[in-house]
Amino acid sequence: MSEVLVIGAGVVGLAVARAVARRGHTVVVAEAAGVIGTGVSARSSEVIHGGMYYPEGSLRARHCIAGAAMLYAFCASHGVPHRACGKLIVATDETERAAIAKIHARGVANGVEGLTLIDGAEARTLEPNLACVAALHAPGTGIIDSHALMLALQGDIEDRGGAIAFHSPVAGLARTGGAWVATVNGDELAFDAVVNAGGLGAHGVAARAAGYPSERIPPRILAKGSYFGCLGRPAFSRLIYPAPVEGGLGIHLTLDLAGRMRFGPDVEWIEAENYDVDPGRADAFVRAIRRYWPGLPEGALTPDYAGIRPKLTGAGAPAADFLIDGPAEHGLAGLVHLFGIESPGLTSSLSLAEEVADRLCP
C-alpha cells in the first residue's frame, strides 16, 4: 500500500484520488480553497461531450470517449443528476457545411456512436426554432450536475478511507529518501507519490517541485469564456453548437437540468485571472446566437458567469492535447503533473484518473 497526495480537489483531482483509493492506497487531497471544485470545475458548461472534435489517437479523444461511458455509468450508480439530451452542431450557411462534415468524419474515426449528418429541414423537425442548412446530430451528448458529481466522488474517496484537507496549499515538494515531502501550512508530510491536478495552479505547483526540470513546465495561457443566461422558457430541448471557432467551440446553447438556457463561452485571451462578465459582450453574443436562433428576443440575455480554460497554446495556434507528465517522461519516481486539462476534462475525468493511477500504482 502506498500513501498518495493529490493536489487539487476539482473534478479531475477527485477522480484521481478515487481511482487510487479504489486500488487500496491511502490518499489525501490537498485543496487550497475551503470547499471542493471552486476553480475550472465550477465554471464549465456541464456538458458530457461525445468526442468528435478531437484528433484521432489524441488523449482528448481517447479519454473523452471512454470517460463519457464511465461517467454515464457512474451517474446511474451514484444518483448524480444528468440527462443524455443530445446535441446539434449546425452549419448556418453553405460555407460551414465542410466544417461539420469534418467533425463528423473525425467523430466516426474516433469511434463515436450515433453521429448523423442531416439537412436543415430534418434539423428543424427536431428543433423547430433552429435556423441552419445542415447539422450533425450527436445523440450521446449530455448534461450533468457537476457539483453533485464532485460530491459523489468525494463520498467514494472518504468511504475508502481517503481524506480531503481544505485550506491546504502545497508550498513545496522535495524528493527525500525515496519519498516526496510536501510542505503544507508549515508542516512537512511524506508521501510515496504525488499527483499535481492543480488546474490553473498546476504550473505553480510544478515550479515548486524540487528537481522537476523547469523547461518541462509548458506555457500557462488563459482563455476566459463568459456565459450569458437567457430569460424566458427554453426554446430548444437539445444543445445547439455552431461550427467551431479559434480557441473554442463557439458560442453555443446549453441547458441546465431545470431546462434553463444559457449561452457561451466566448473566447477572450487574458493575462490574469478575472471572472467578471462584461455586459458589453452581449452584443457579440446576440449576433452569434441569431445565426442559428433568429428568434432570440431583444434584451433576453443577462450576464451569468465566466470560466477560464487552462490552455497550453494561444491565439492562432492549434489546440494542444492534454499533457500528462509522469515518471516515464521526466524520470522522477512517483510524480505526475497534469497540464492543460480543459474541455473535455470533466467528461474525461474518470478515464484520465485510471491512466494516472496506472502510471503511479498499477
Image (cartoon, rainbow, N blue to C red):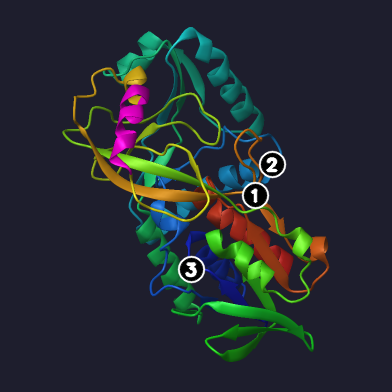
Give the residue drawn at x 58%, y 72%. 6
64 inside magenta stretch? no
Spatial CA distance of label 3 from label 2 is: 25 Å
**How far from the left and from the top, in percent, is residue 225?**
43, 43
Which is more toward the observer, 31 or 108? Answer: 31
Q: Are marks 1 and 2 in contact (CB under 8 Å)?
A: yes
**How far from the left and from the top, in percent, is residue 3?**
64, 82
* Residue 353 visible somewhere in the drawing: yes
Residue 177 in the image: above or below residue 318: below
Which kind of residue does numbered mark 1 sit on? Phe
Quadrant where the image shows the C terminus: bottom right
Which disc is residue 9 wearing?
A: 3
> Where does label 1 land, which residue?
322
* Residue 362 visible somewhere in the drawing: no
> Where does label 2 land, which residue?
58
Q: Secondary structure at mark 1?
A: loop
Spatial CA distance of label 1 from label 3 is: 18 Å
Left or right: 308, with 147 as reference point: right
Left or right: 210, with 232 as reference point: right
Q: Secondary structure at mark 3?
A: loop
Give the residue drawn at x 40%, y 59%. 149
